[in-house]
Amino acid sequence: MRKIIALLILCSLALSVQASDWPKWRGPHNTGISHETEWNPKALAGIPNIVWKSEIGKGHSGIVIKGDRLFSMGNKLRFRGTDTTYVDEVICIDRRTGRTLWLYTYPCGNRNWPGPRATPTVEGETLYTVSWDGQFYAFDINTGSVRWFHQLVEEGLSEQPNWGFSGSAAIEGDLVIMAAGKRGIAFNKHSGAVVWNNGKGAPTLPTPLIYEADGKKVVALAEQRNYHVLDIKTGETLASYPFYTTDIDPILIDNELFMASGQGSRMLKLNGIEYESVMDNRRSRFSAWQNFVIVNGHAYGFFRQGRRAGIQCIETESGEVKWRENLGVWGSVMAAGDHLIILTGSGHLKIIDASPDAYNLQSEASVMKMGDNIGLDMAYQCFCWTQPVFLDSQIFARNNWGEIICVDMK
């Protein structure tokens, strides 16, 4: 009987680990927040415990995790004799050791900024990825074999966005929805067949946001200065939410939608698909496309004002800036419990309190290998702009030159 009880406990622990996966951009709840509390915010004091390091190629693609498998993307220059080819790499890594489990490559050149922008999405046994030029793949997560594939631009499904395809796949039921075309495209997640398509056009940066309104699932997709709310089954436009720009993903908490941009912030109170604007403040600005997190009614994210750049706290109800801390560079931020995990553009991890009272540093350390940026155009310099991931008391982070690390925070 004791053995049976022990086995049941182990099974329940295994299930809880699976439940704590980080399967998509901004995590399981689209918020960039981990609810783990069993970790040490002061763990970066002294010498940080870096468990492993690996290389995955250039790009800004984020990290997703299912079980012990970590997935991301990068771009590398391949040499074969006298020939050179740029290739994207979709990589699966053992998150315990940093060892590569499988790798899939395909030719993909560079425009603007090197490498992929979008973060993979894992659902069930399938991984969905998209390159900056619209090569959309569905992979078996165990073997790396291709289940199906679309070239969104060459097939005439979408125009090429100026900054490349940046939104990740969003899954609901049998549908996988992409920020592509004029107002999104839905595919059958099993076969890749197009279910609905709202016309040819170029998408903007955010990932489709799925939520429930009036008793049914809807999806919000960005188009220039509007978020359009669509019937998820048909793609029919149900409503539109105007905004300054739509380069940063909005966050939905209960029935309130907080939207931010480099031109201001706005809070909408939703009643089904209808909305009421309850806050609109042009002074509460975030950096053009750097995302943010909301903890206890306050939004935390990066700003840039003149020569200053750093982290700030904004009260979502009023739009009031509560505090700002100049860090000198852009970076990225996520939250774990009542703390923020900040990765600065220059490779420093900082743990601070998620508090509107003040910027209160708990611990910090330089953790990333940063390249020499002297003489390079900004697009080719080395930065850390991709949001880190926090799972099982470990931080997983990357820079845009392809180094990826695991830092233990116990």
Image (cartoon, rainbow, N blue to C red):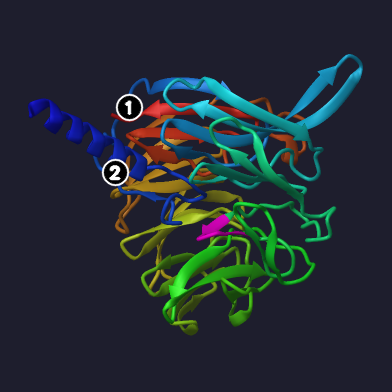
Residue 325, how many percent across, how many down? Answer: 44, 50
Foreground mark, 1 or 2?
2
Q: Residue furthest top?
A: 81
Which residue type carries mark 1?
Ala
Any part of residue 367 in sight: no
Which stretch is magenta?
Answer: 170-177
Q: Is residue 360 magenta?
A: no
**Element under disc 1:** loop
Residue at x 46%, y 56% (from the top left corner): 30
Q: Is-magenta flag for residue 174?
A: yes
Closer to the chain start, of discs 1 and 2, is: 2
Horizontal side, residue 378 vs residue 84: left or right: left
Q: Main secondary structure of the magenta part?
A: strand
Q: Position of residue 392 (x, y in %)?
A: 33, 35
Inspect the image, locate mark 2, and give the three-letter code of the amino acid beneath it. Answer: Glu
Question: On screen, 6 above or below 125?
Answer: above
Q: Residue at x 77, y 38 (%)?
A: 377
* Inter-mark Cα distance, 1 to 2: 20 Å
User: Mark 2 and mark 1 in contact (Cβ < 8 Å)?
Assistant: no
Q: Determine whether 98 is above or below 355 in the image.
A: above
Judging by the rendered image, the residue that carries numbered circle 2 is 36
Q: Secondary structure at mark 2?
A: loop
User: Of all residues shown, which one is farthest toward the left?
Assistant: 1
Q: Which residue is mark 1?
A: 45
Q: Residue at x 28, y 33 (%)?
A: 42
Which numbered dot is residue 189? none
Q: Is residue 218 left or right of residue 178?
A: left
